Image (spheres, helix red, strand yellow):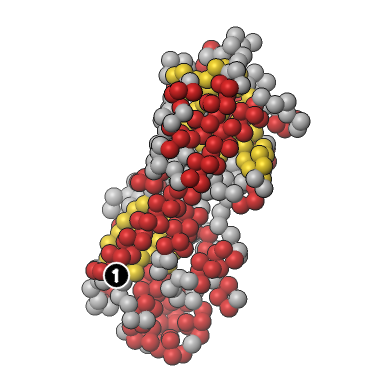
Amino acid sequence: MFTMPKRLGILVGGGPAPGINSAISSAAIEAVNSGLEVVGILDGFQHLAAGRTDMVQPLTIGDVSRIHVRGGSILRTSRTNPTRNAEDLQRTIKSLQELGIAYLVTIGGDDTAFSASEVAKAADGALRVAHVPKTIDNDLPLPGGMPTFGFETARHVGTQEVLSLMEDSRTTNRWYFVVVMGREAGHLALGIGKSAGASLSIIPEEFAQEQISVWDICRVLEGAMLKRQVMGQMHGVAVIAEGIAEKMDPEELAQFPGVEIGQDAFGHISLNEIPLATIIRRGVHKKFADRGKKLSLVDFTLGYNLRSAPPIPFDIDYTRTLGYGAIRFLLSEPEDELLRHGGLICLRDGQRSVMSFEELRDPATGKTRVRRVDCGSEHYAVARKYMIRLEKHDLANSEMRTKLADAAAMSPEDFEREFASVVNWDGDAA
Ligand code: F6P
């Protein structure tokens, strides 16, 4: 039995996302106002899993009342996986017991949601967990298409960055390739590219095949650049989702300089060790050089500079409701047996709703389901129609095909053969 049943812990796992402090603040204020004692647990599950109980700090209303506008996380964060082995899981439960924590608010993405559900299950009734869904990747399957918190701020800040690069590209008459974080989902890259009106955005979801090559991406870019050239412009900005790298053969990637194929604590490829933007820039450079054209290309990576930005009002407002909702849920009597140990707090039509951890899991993998961009949606169709990239109608139109072939210094037949694989979208005619 716990000795201090009225203690609530708050921890943050995974990558930073704008709005974390606001969620902490809102949850802590409502918990204190509800008569609970609140402690902030530093560095996610890291110290709990190591059996340490000293890396905590009390949180009073005074400590948190003005942090909601700040980026980053006052409790820091880590990617420690407390379910990595049975010992770590048991140590985590024991540390929470020693701290007298009966209620836990976890703020995190898919991996932290998975950890939270495993910890709650293993505590077997001694702990209730409310998970608040965060990640700039927007890849948790929230109802009604609601974003994960942090995504809107990241999209906003990223859009400003891309708009600035678009101005630079116009001014200096060159192309920029911007790789954007998002793991295996392309929401952030597409959201930024569509909002900024970038020349094109490339996301992993658009490729039906399981595996793609670096050269497939270079070819898409080359086609778009040639089309833009035909339209009289030698500049542009291409936004590329980092998750493209997860669809590539690690052996192919390993041949490029500076690539290390490693994994994080949850078994994901460490994408920061793959200089994707540079690899693609060099590849496209080579493609143009092979036909005697010298190009000025610059690559750029967006992600770390978005994650700890101060939240925009949308994310502050949203996280205040979610943080409050987490406490109301923890202090309520769950009607649904599936929510006995805890659940994920979200909004459905503006009302608090709780998803069970089971509902979140992919039955095939046992892991949290990943929400990907739906390339059959109108949201995607609009983004795609406003891009400058080779589509089926370009190759079907003989005048356009001839102009493109001229720009590429090829015959129209060779051009069509070479670029046929690039036109991968069936919504073209819609
Ligand atoms: O938080 C999610 C995320 O931002 C992904 O988009 C990205 O791949 C990952 O974190 C990288 O995080 P880190 O390098 O801190 O592990």
- The quarter of the rendered structure image containing the N terminus is top right
Q: Residue shown at 58%/37% (left/top)? A: 322
Residue 405 figure quarter: bottom left
Q: Quadrant of the C terminus?
A: bottom right
- Determine whether the residue tagged by mark 1 lies in a helix, strand or loop: helix
Q: Residue furthest top?
A: 3
Residue at the image position 40 percent from the left and 42 percent from the top? 310
Can you say whether 389 is above or below 168 in the image? below
Residue closer to the observer: 182 or 410: 182
Q: Quadrant of residue 77?
A: top left
Q: Residue at x 55, y 17 (%)?
A: 37
Q: Where does residue 380 sit, x and y in percent of width and height?
A: 55, 64
Horizontal relation, residue 324 to residue 359: left or right: left
Q: Nearer the viewer, residue 330 or 259?
A: 330
Q: Which residue is mark 1?
A: 170
**183 shown above or below 355:** below
Give the image location of residue 161, x and y in percent. Answer: 35, 56
Give the side of residue 191 with respect to residue 101, left or right: left
